[in-house]
């Protein structure tokens, strides 16, 4: 609407380019700082009744924080107070407000936008962004919180596959409550809920127990929950039990990475046991099995010829009971099983695994076998759907980046905001 009233904006207004504002004048202060005087060019309505104010009551000079315009600037708004002309309105007067500088705000919307962009897109730390823009950390955080309120509504999305994964976002810390003088333990665990199709983080809840996730899921509309076909989780029996309550119709898939971890753990325990039995001490660098302990854990199909030869040497020279090789075969068979593409192949791989476990005949591998059996239904879901918490893990990697740049968050709400904003921004790029 301003194009008609201001067909030829003056040069300063054009260069300053703040929407709905006109530059009244500029000053150069003694230390080189530039001061810009502005006034609004749009009508303001009364916040109580909405009637446009036309009569000026008073005016004042208000300092406004803004983005740098060819260097830092100090902005002063000649802000008007107007009479409300609606006779039945209880409000007598009101202050002007615009989209760029809403009521009670002392910061332009474009500065808020620049701060959020700097933190979310570049992954810069809030403190770093604050210094670069010459504003307080608190203002950066406020801009982020405000942006978070504009995030897409999770309840309007219809995710098919969810991934739920816990992660620790920093070490445990203790804070003294200033009111009660008691030390309070800050739980650094968080659980993220991710849409496995898009990779977007749908929710972040405090703690690692399943009650937080349950409370989050129960808040979603029934239709939303019924639409979820698969949920991928880490192997936790308590969590699986709880999921049946919140998502009774959803198939549960168990993450293959965590199963491989369990297989590796069994192999490591066997190796340590054998060292005690055979040598009566812990492994040392001179023992081939200890020296190549990481090699033992690697997937055999990723080994180079040289690595394979080393492994053969370990089995030939440092495995008199053949129990290490037997446990290694079990671990490799678990990997093989998880790679199968059909339930028939998985069933065959499971039979072979059972045979190897019996042959190995060690408590560590037997325990692993029992875990595989207890999670067999979920493993079948994994093989059919391919739903793993891998996407969640990828997100957790970017979460770790946020943690690094954030230099440790005390306030988990601030941390959650950052995670959600970054994830939403990434999803918008990848799935426009
Ligand atoms: Zn009014």
Image (cartoon, rainbow, N blue to C red):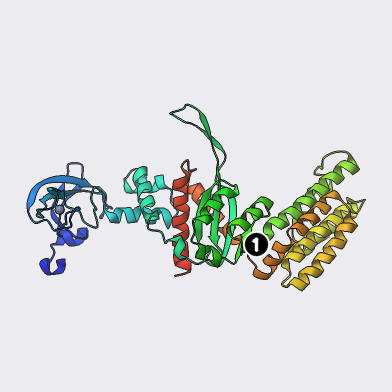
Q: Nearest the camera: 256 or 7?
A: 256
Check the picture and name the quadrant holding the C terminus: bottom left
Residue 320 x, y percent position in the rendering: 92, 51
Residue 183 lies, in percent from the top left, at 52, 30
- Quadrant in the picture for the N terminus: bottom left
Q: Residues within 10 Å of mark 1 (few under 14, many from 20)?
A: many
Q: Nearer the viewer, residue 126 or 359?
A: 359
- Is 315 placed left or right of 108 in the picture? right
**Residue closest to the eye, 363 or 247:** 247
Say whether residue 36 is left or right of residue 425.
left
Q: Residue furthest top?
A: 181
On the question of residue 414 being in view, the answer is: yes
**Residue pictured at 17% horizontal, 52% vertical:** 96
Query: Across the whole image, how many numbered discs are drawn on residues?
Result: 1
Residue 325 higher or lower than 58, as above or below: below
Where is residue 201? Give x, y as percent.
Answer: 51, 58
Residue 85 position by quadrant: bottom left
Where does residue 218 sit, x and y in percent of width and height?
A: 52, 55
Q: Residue at x 83, y 49 (%)?
A: 270
User: What SS does tag 1 mark?
Assistant: strand
Residue to which mark 1 is pinned: 252
Rendered position, 41 above or below 414 = below
Q: Is mark 1 within 8 Å of ligand 1?
A: no
Residue at image position (17%, 44%) is 29
Q: Is residue 301 visible?
A: no
Q: Give the image quarter of residue 335.
A: bottom right
**Which of 323 and 359 lies nearest the eye of the viewer?**
359
Does residue 214 appear left or right of residue 43 in this picture? Answer: right
The residue sitting at the right extreme is 320
């Amino acid at each position: 609407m301003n194009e008609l009233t201001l067909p030829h904006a003056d040069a300063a207004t054009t260069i300053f380019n703040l929407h709905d504002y006109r530059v009244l004048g500029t000053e150069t202060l003694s230390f080189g700082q530039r001061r810009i005087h502005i006034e609004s060019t749009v009508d303001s309505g009364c916040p109580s009744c909405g009637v446009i104010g036309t009569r000026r009551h008073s005016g004042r000079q208000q300092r406004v924080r803004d983005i740098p315009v060819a260097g830092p600037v100090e902005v002063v708004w000649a802000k008007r107070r107007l009479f409300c002309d609606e006779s039945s309105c209880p409000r007598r007067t009101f202050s002007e407000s615009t989209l760029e500088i809403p009521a009670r705000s002392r910061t332009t919307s474009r500065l808020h936008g620049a701060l959020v962009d700097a933190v979310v897109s570049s992954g810069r730390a809030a403190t770093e962004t604050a210094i670069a823009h010459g504003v307080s950390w608190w203002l950066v955080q406020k801009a982020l919180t405000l942006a978070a309120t504009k995030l897409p509504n999770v309840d309007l999305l219809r995710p098919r596959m969810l991934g739920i994964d816990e992660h620790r976002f920093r070490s445990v810390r203790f804070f003294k409550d200033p009111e009660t003088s008691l030390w309070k333990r800050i739980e650094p665990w968080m659980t993220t809920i991710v849409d496995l199709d898009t990779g977007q983080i749908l929710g972040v809840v405090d703690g690692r127990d399943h009650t937080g996730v349950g409370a989050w899921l129960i808040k979603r509309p029934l239709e939303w929950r019924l639409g979820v076909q698969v949920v991928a989780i880490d192997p936790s029996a308590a969590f699986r039990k709880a999921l049946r309550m919140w998502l009774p119709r959803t198939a549960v898939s168990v993450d293959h990475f965590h199963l491989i971890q369990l297989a590796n753990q069994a192999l490591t325990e066997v190796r340590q046991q054998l060292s005690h039995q055979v040598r009566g001490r812990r492994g040392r660098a001179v023992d081939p099995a200890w020296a190549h302990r990481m090699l033992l854990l690697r997937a055999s199909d990723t080994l180079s010829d040289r690595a394979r030869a080393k492994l053969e040497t370990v089995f030939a020279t440092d495995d008199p009971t053949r129990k290490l090789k037997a446990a290694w075969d079990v671990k490799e068979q678990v990997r093989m099983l998880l790679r199968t593409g059909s339930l028939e192949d998985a069933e065959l791989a499971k039979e072979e695994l059972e045979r190897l476990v019996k042959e190995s005949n060690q408590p560590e591998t037997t325990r692993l076998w029992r875990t595989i059996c207890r999670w067999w239904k979920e493993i079948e879901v994994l093989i059919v759907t391919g739903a793993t918490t891998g996407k969640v893990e990828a997100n957790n990697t970017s979460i770790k980046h946020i943690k690094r740049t954030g230099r440790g968050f005390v306030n988990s709400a601030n941390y959650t905001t950052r995670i959600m904003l970054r994830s939403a921004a990434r999803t918008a790029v990848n799935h426009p």
